[in-house]
Amino acid sequence: MIRAFADPRLELARETVGFVRALRDPRLPPRVLQLVDGQGRRYFAKQHDNRQRYGQEVQAYRTWAQHLHRHVPELAGCRDNTRTLLLTAIPGTGVDAVAPGSPEEELAHFEAGRILGVLHQATLIPRSGAIGPVLAQRLARWMTRAEQAGLISCAERGLLSAHEEVLGNTLMDSAVCHLDYQPRNWRIGESFGLYDLEHMRRDARIRDFARLEFRRWQAAPRLRHAFYSGYGRHPNDTEQRLLESFGAIEAVTALVRGDEQKDLALSAHGRTVLARLS
């Protein structure tokens, strides 16, 4: 157990805003602390294990967050040598805590679509040929890992290879993407709020819908409709087929990560998505 005075997250916060105390929140991952200062202002202090993810998140707050003004936290401070960030807290309720089937849940998806549309439109490069081969190579690497671990059959390898070919040979819009866009990272209150920018980078625009498509919307199509209504348009037939190929990445990464982390739920999710693609 790290003693409080030695915690680099607390050190960063105290150097940046002065006195703070930690607020216990068992829902937060161990690397994140919720803090409050002497004026009652709340913050989150986060420490990364991975230097690349730390760098990506700092860059996201310093550059692309400008397109999401008032909808993402402010970067109050960071320290490179300990890979720590101090972020302002966004008021509101976590969307994962909203009652399933409620009007509030539907509104959250509408707002999520609207705000993601702002980010994508501001950073769009139409029909680029650069991003598809990169994603095909990424899928190929995950397929190799899954095969080496004995997680996929020859038939499943063939199915995934067909999606690899689609990705490698398709022109697709690119945009700055969040890439973990799902309710656990959303807040709803006076306005929509978005957390966790550590995965944010330029990628295929359609890929930003994949986690919602394969983790949320199968059981609640009305939420899909609400989201795309906020976004401004639904995917066309070509984009919907491309989304299925992003499902191949979703499936195989879930299988590998689930196996490595002994996470049965994640492994089961990978199997479910893979079965849908068959």
Image (cartoon, rainbow, N blue to C red):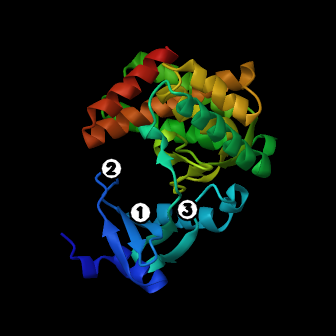
Q: Badge 2 is on which residue?
A: 27
Residue 274 shows in the view = yes
List x then y, in percent, for residue 78. Answer: 50, 75
Residue 50, labelled with which disc? Answer: 1
Residue 151 shows in the view = no
Q: What secondary structure is found at the residue carrying circle 3?
A: helix
Crowding around mark 2 (Cα neighbors within 10 Å: few <14, some 14 to 19, many 20+) is few
- Which quadrant is home to the N terminus? bottom left
Q: Please state which of the two labelled residues, at mark 2 or mark 3, is closer to the viewer.
A: 2
| 187 sits left or right of 70 in the view | left
List x then y, in percent, for residue 25. Answer: 31, 56
| 130 sits left or right of 207 in the view | right
Q: Is residue 135 above or below residue 41?
A: above
Q: What secondary structure is found at the residue carrying circle 2?
A: loop
Q: Badge 3 is on which residue?
A: 56
User: Label 3 near label 1: C-beta < 8 Å?
Assistant: no
